[in-house]
């Protein structure tokens, strides 16, 4: 795979990852983390860059991606889990959030007396553009990788450079009242869940594999190498931008009283844009948000539609594009806050399972392991993740779960993953080993 093609696919992947959550969460985390910024942003980058990088690469371990690899656990698990992931990062949560975030940051600042009607009109225009970009999947690499991504990068870099010159040498903002100073890394790590990047990587890996295949590469080893190159380019760009946006939030001259009940990341970016460039800054921010959200929504519609067409081939890809665009449009009109609040408990269950699956794919790929060593940790993590969310949300009191190691940091599932692998390996020692094709 040539360097030029690696950059084209890498830029496409970066643009699909860099959406609503990627833009608003880093500055919000930087603002509340104070002197603990670097630990917090390290956790965020691990979730938002490291895990997505591993997730995309793990998808190329088998020629047919996760659809094939996860059958090691059970064929039913592979289908059900992939359906849940695609619906979560697709029409149920992530795609509606791209529309509502772009509306609140790119449209509301220029309007008076905005309401449900203005959101409806914007949603119609936004999803019409998404539909036109995603209706023909073959044009995705060209339209995103070659055209939209350069504009996205230029607008982001322009804002970041100007903001750095404004706030260089400033003291960090005070630590937020609710920020957990005893575990800043885990705060950043779990905050990164909201970007949905690690689970989005499972969906985007299909687009990456198809894009590389379209360049004439079909050998499994060459597919893996091409994926590593492209994913590394996307990860590098994401890491630089996350840290820069977080640093801006950490240095911005604002107080919690200034922000009030508004989303911190949204307010900070709007404020910085105005300070940096005045009215032009607001237009620049609108361009950043619209491009980031449009490219992410397009990538997700394509990924979800391709997957469902594959498992239900009687329904065409184009029909699925229409269906999922309409569902996303309807849910987007609930508003940003409702979409985010609904997604939190779902992501708290899915993320540990997705991370465990990615880690186990790598472990069992490099270490000859029996099937049970993959099955058992996934099963244990599913149970403990569900119980943890049920208890934390007060749906059912289970005080015993608070005594589990790392519960305070929301990492109580990690020991079960490790123990599950070891136990599964020992129990299945004489069984047939996993082989990926």
Image (cartoon, rainbow, N blue to C red):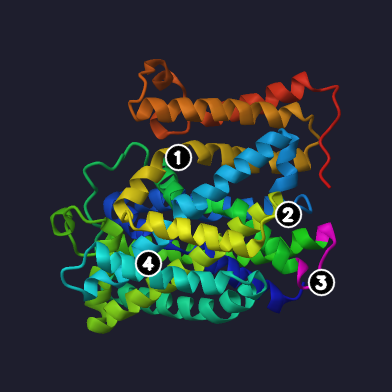
Residue 123's disc is 4
Q: CA distance from mark 1 to mark 2?
A: 26 Å
| Location of mark 2 (residue) | 60
Q: Nearer the viewer, residue 322 or 432?
A: 322
What's the distance in space between the residues labelled 2 and 4, CA to CA? 35 Å
Give how far apart the Cα atoms at labels 3 and 2 are.
16 Å
Most distant residue in the front direction = 314
**At which x and y percent is residue 254?**
18, 61
Q: How many marks?
A: 4
Task: Establish if 162 lies above or below 195.
Answer: below
Magenta highlight: main SS: loop
Identify the mark nearer the N-term, 4 or 3: 4
Q: Secondary structure at mark 4?
A: helix
Q: Mark 3 touching mark 2, by CB under 8 A?
A: no
**Quadrant where the N terminus lies?**
bottom right
Give left or right: position of 437 versus 383: right
Q: Nearer the viewer, residue 168 or 425?
A: 425
Q: Position of residue 232 (x, y in %)?
A: 62, 63
Region of the chain picked out in magenta, as a range:
213-221
- Report the residue at 45% width, 80% height from top: 154
Q: Which residue is mark 1?
A: 346
Find numbered disc 3 in the image and state the secondary structure of the residue it sits on.
loop
Task: Reply above or below: 42 against 254.
Answer: above
């Amino acid at each position: 795979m040539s360097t030029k093609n690696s950059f084209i696919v890498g830029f496409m992947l970066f643009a699909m990852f860099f959406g609503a959550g990627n833009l608003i969460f880093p500055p919000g985390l930087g603002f509340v983390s104070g002197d603990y910024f670097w630990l917090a942003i390290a956790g965020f980058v691990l979730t938002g860059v490291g895990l997505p990088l591993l997730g995309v690469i793990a998808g190329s371990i088998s020629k047919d991606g996760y659809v094939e690899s996860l059958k090691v656990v059970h064929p039913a698990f592979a289908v059900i889990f992939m359906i849940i992931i695609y619906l979560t990062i697709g029409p149920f949560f992530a795609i509606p959030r791209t529309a509502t975030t772009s509306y609140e940051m790119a449209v509301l600042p220029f309007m008076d007396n905005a309401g449900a009607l203005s959101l409806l009109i914007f949603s119609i225009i936004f999803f019409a553009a998404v539909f036109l970009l995603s209706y023909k999947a073959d044009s995705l690499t060209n339209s995103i990788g070659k055209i939209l991504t350069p504009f996205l990068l230029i607008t982001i870099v322009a804002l970041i450079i100007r903001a750095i010159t404004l706030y260089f040498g400033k003291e960090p903002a005070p630590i937020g009242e609710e920020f957990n100073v005893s575990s800043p890394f885990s705060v950043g790590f779990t905050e990164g869940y909201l970007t949905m990047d690690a689970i989005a990587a499972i969906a985007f890996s299909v687009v990456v594999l198809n894009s590389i295949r379209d360049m004439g590469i079909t050998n499994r080893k060459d597919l893996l190498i091409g994926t590593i190159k492209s994913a590394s380019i996307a990860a590098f760009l994401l890491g630089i931008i996350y840290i820069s946006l977080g640093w801006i939030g950490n240095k911005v001259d604002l107080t919690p009283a200034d922000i009030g009940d508004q989303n911190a990341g949204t307010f900070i970016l709007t404020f910085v844009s105005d300070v940096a460039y005045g009215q032009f800054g607001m237009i620049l921010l609108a361009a950043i948000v619209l491009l980031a959200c449009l490219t992410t929504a397009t990538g997700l519609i394509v990924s979800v539609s391709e997957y469902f067409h594959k498992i239900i081939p009687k329904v065409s890809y184009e029909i699925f594009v229409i269906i999922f665009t309409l569902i996303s449009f309807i849910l987007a009109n609930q508003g940003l806050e409702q979409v985010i609040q609904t997604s939190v408990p779902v992501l708290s269950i899915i993320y540990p399972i997705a991370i465990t699956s990615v880690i186990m794919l790598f472990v069992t790929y490099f270490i000859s392991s029996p099937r049970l060593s993959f099955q058992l940790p996934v099963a244990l993590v599913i149970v403990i993740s569900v119980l943890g969310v049920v208890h934390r949300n007060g749906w059912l009191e289970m005080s015993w779960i608070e005594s589990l190691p790392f519960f305070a940091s929301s990492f109580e599932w990690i020991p079960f993953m490790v123990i599950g692998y070891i136990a599964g390996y020992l129990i299945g020692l004489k069984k047939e080993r996993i082989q990926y094709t």
